[in-house]
Image (cartoon, helix red, strand yellow):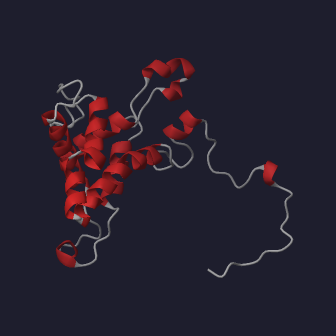
């Protein structure tokens, strides 16, 4: 297991945890993001989100910027800030076997989410971004705020499934894509006008 993969495993488990306490609602409600293989999908998405347009990375043959290792390091930096500010409510713990050994992975799940908030709005990096008007620091804030939403979107989307269904679809009782439903049939369009845009 790599440091990046292990740190993202801790992140995924905080955002989409397994919920064995919901077993009475059905077996589909028990597994979480780790069970659905969400870590690999999330790392891949983060690594392909920013295309490379020349520069040193382009010269090395990269088509996209590998941001996942940077995000993992930022999560650890945010965890350290959370600890130094004494905002971690449960302190450091032994990380699960599938996690990396860094400070982010050693926080309790709720404290991991508090660390993400440090990157987004409450920590040193957002304060520097406001003070220095630095676009790079603003990118970190954007990525931190989008990371939770991206994780949930991937979990409840089709990328963690086999094309027919996914764990998120089963939990939400979503039947999957359809060519159309009978309720929408019978509404013919008399006239269609193309917009100028």
How many labels sit on residues?
Answer: 0
State whether residue 75 is above or below residue 195. Answer: above
Q: Is residue 69 visible?
A: no
The residue that appears at 51% across and 49% down in the rendered structure is 158
**Horizontal and vertical percent position of residue 15:** 37, 37
Check the image and name the residue furthest to the bottom: 196
- Residue 163 x/y as whole percent: 53, 49
Residue drawn 80% across the image and 48% down it: 183
104 vs 152, left or right, is: left
Q: Which quarter of the figure has residue 39?
A: top left
Q: Residue at x 55, y 23 (%)?
A: 26
114 or 92: nearer the eye?
114
Residue 53 visible? The answer is yes
Nearest the viewer among 97 and 153 is: 153
Give the image location of residue 77, x and y in percent: 16, 45
Placement of the N terminus among the 4 image quadrants: top left
The percent position of residue 95, horizontal first and vertical second, equals: 20, 29
- Would residue 14 be found to the left or right of residue 29 on screen? left
Image point (41%, 50%), residue name: 150
Answer with left or right where residue 38 lies relative to residue 2. right
């Amino acid at each position: 297991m790599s440091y990046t993969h292990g740190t993202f495993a801790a992140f995924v488990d905080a955002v989409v945890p397994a919920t064995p306490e919901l077993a009475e609602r059905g077996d589909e409600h028990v597994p979480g993001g780790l069970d659905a293989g969400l870590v690999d999908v999330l790392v891949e998405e983060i690594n392909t989100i920013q295309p490379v347009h020349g520069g040193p990375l382009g010269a090395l043959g990269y088509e996209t910027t590998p941001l996942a290792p940077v995000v993992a390091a930022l999560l650890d930096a945010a965890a350290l800030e959370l600890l130094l500010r004494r905002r971690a409510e449960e302190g450091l713990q032994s990380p699960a076997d599938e996690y990396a050994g860094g400070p982010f992975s050693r926080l309790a799940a709720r404290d991991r989410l508090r660390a993400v908030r440090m990157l987004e709005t409450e920590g040193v990096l957002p304060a520097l971004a406001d003070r220095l008007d630095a676009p790079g620091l603003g990118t970190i804030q954007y990525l931190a705020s989008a990371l939770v939403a991206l994780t949930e979107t991937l979990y409840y989307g089709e990328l963690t499934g086999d094309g027919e269904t996914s764990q998120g679809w089963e939990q939400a009782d979503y039947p999957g894509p359809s060519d159309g439903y009978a309720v929408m049939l019978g509404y013919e369009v008399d006239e269609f006008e193309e917009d100028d845009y």
